[in-house]
Image (cartoon, helix red, strand yellow):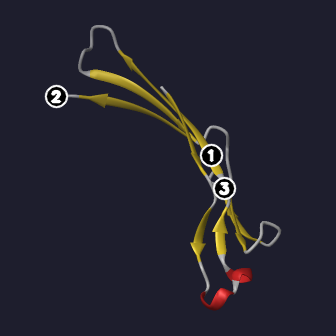
Amino acid sequence: RGSYNFRSSYALSLMPYGRIDQDRYRDDSAQFDISAQYYIPGMDDVVLTLEGLNMTDETEYSYLGVKERSEGFTGVGRTIVLGVRATF
């Protein structure tokens, strides 16, 4: 299974009295995640799972007023998780 999530830019905080140069925004961001599961033949109660989060290694940017005034970025990288699920 795969999923793609997109979020357009949005305001993090707005300053009073029209000081738009200090308004904080988060830029557009997108993320692609995948997951798979494998049922082991003969072991109906055991499932192997694999998840990959943020496979495109997206970074989120924030800025003040205009995009040219960068405030910071968040980059958590890819996360890959292998697991076993069992029912008793």
Q: Nearer the viewer, residue 72 or 52?
A: 72
Question: Which residue is situated farthest in the top direction here?
Answer: 42
Q: Is residue 85 above or below residue 39?
A: below
Tag 2, which secondary structure?
loop
Inter-mark Cα distance, 1 to 2: 38 Å
For residue 56, side relative to residue 49 (left or right): right
Q: Given the image, on which type of amino acid does mark 3 rest?
A: Gly
Judging by the rendered image, the residue that carries numbered circle 1 is: 30
Instruction: Tell me which numbered mark, 2 or 3, is placed earlier along the sequence.
Output: 3
Question: Which residue is situated farthest in the front direction here?
Answer: 18
Asked if the residues shown at circle 1 and circle 3 are in contact, with their CB atoms under 8 angstroms apart, the answer is: no
Q: Is residue 27 above or below residue 87?
A: below
The crowd level at tag 1 (other Cα within 10 Å; few <14, some 14-19, many 20+) is some
Number of the front mark, 2 or 3: 3
**Residue 38 point in image, percent of width and height:** 40, 18
Identified at 32% across, 8% down, the residue is 41
Inter-mark Cα distance, 2 to 3: 39 Å
**Residue 49 point in image, percent of width and height:** 41, 28
Identified at 65% across, 69% down, the residue is 25
Residue 88's mark? 2
For residue 62, side relative to residue 10 (left or right): right
Q: Quadrant of residue 69?
A: bottom right
State which quarter of the image contains the C terminus: top left
Q: Given the image, on which type of amino acid does mark 1 rest?
A: Ala
Tag 3, which secondary structure?
loop
Q: Given the image, on which type of amino acid does mark 2 rest?
A: Phe
Judging by the rendered image, the residue that carries numbered circle 3 is: 75
Q: Nearer the viewer, residue 38 or 6?
A: 6
**Residue 60 point in image, percent of width and height:** 66, 57
